[in-house]
Image (cartoon, helix red, strand yellow):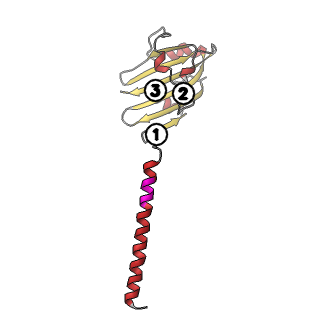
Amino acid sequence: MSPHDAYRLRLLVIVIALLGLVVTVSISVLIGQYAPAAPVQSEIAAEITDRDILEGNTELKIPTNATDIHGYVDGFRDVTTLLRFTMPAYDLDSFLKQTSCALPLKTDSSRSVWSQNSPIHKWWRPGDAQRFAVCIGSTPQLGRRLFFDMTQPDQYIVYVVASTR
């Protein structure tokens, strides 16, 4: 094989490789354009069940007897935390003392705010409540809304939305 033929062969291999690269990139771009978009959320968005993190973010002490604890945290500078847990009804008064909620709890007005169940978090179901109470228990640095599902008289499901200000 002459040096000229070897040069032409190398050139042909490079051209074929470049053509293959262009085709691969083009296909990737086309697939990316038609693929469904992922839900938008921040890089730190996560489901959390760690009591310490959830208590710190909501500035609430979860009752010792609480069960079925779920949480979701999202945000960067302004962090929003969703917290849900089930507690015995007899723990309500002691829990409320730390919330800054005005008493008695409201049982008539804010239903529409809480009527949506989450399609993403199967544990976020305030819209299922047949009997409920709500309150706003904010602090200077934290906006906090609470919803109590009192459908079952012996245990309540508590929903908290807390957002830093």
Amino acid on which disc 1 is placed: Pro
Query: Which secondary structure, mark 1?
Result: loop
- Examine the structure image and report whether residue 28 is included in the region drawn in magenta: yes
In the figure, is residue 113 to the left or right of 70? Answer: left
**Which quadrant of the figure contains the C terminus?**
top left
Residue tagged 1: 39
Q: Quadrant of residue 8?
A: bottom left
Q: Find the magenta span and give its range.
A: 25-30
Q: Earlier in the sequence, mark 3 or mark 1?
A: 1
Q: In the rendered structure, are the residues bearing label 2 and label 3 in contact, judged by CB atoms less than 8 Å apart?
A: no
Residue tagged 3: 58
Amino acid on which disc 3 is placed: Thr
On the question of residue 136 being in view, the answer is yes
Q: Position of residue 48 (x, y in %)?
A: 52, 35
- Characterize the local packing of mark 1: few (<14), some (14-19) or many (20 or more) Cα atoms within 10 angstroms: few
- Characterize the local packing of mark 2: few (<14), some (14-19) or many (20 or more) Cα atoms within 10 angstroms: many
- At x 49%, y 38%, the residue is 46
Marks 2 and 3 sit apart, C-alpha to C-alpha, by 16 Å
Mark closer to the observer (2, 1): 1
Q: Main secondary structure of the magenta part?
A: helix
Q: Position of residue 39 (x, y in %)?
A: 46, 39
Is 16 situated above or below 82? below
Amino acid on which disc 2 is placed: Trp
- Characterize the local packing of mark 3: few (<14), some (14-19) or many (20 or more) Cα atoms within 10 angstroms: many
Marks 2 and 1 sit apart, C-alpha to C-alpha, by 18 Å
- At x 49%, y 16%, the residue is 111
Q: In the rendered structure, are the residues bearing label 2 and label 1 in contact, judged by CB atoms less than 8 Å apart?
A: no
Q: Position of residue 9 (x, y in %)?
A: 42, 82
Mark closer to the observer (3, 1): 1
Residue tagged 2: 124
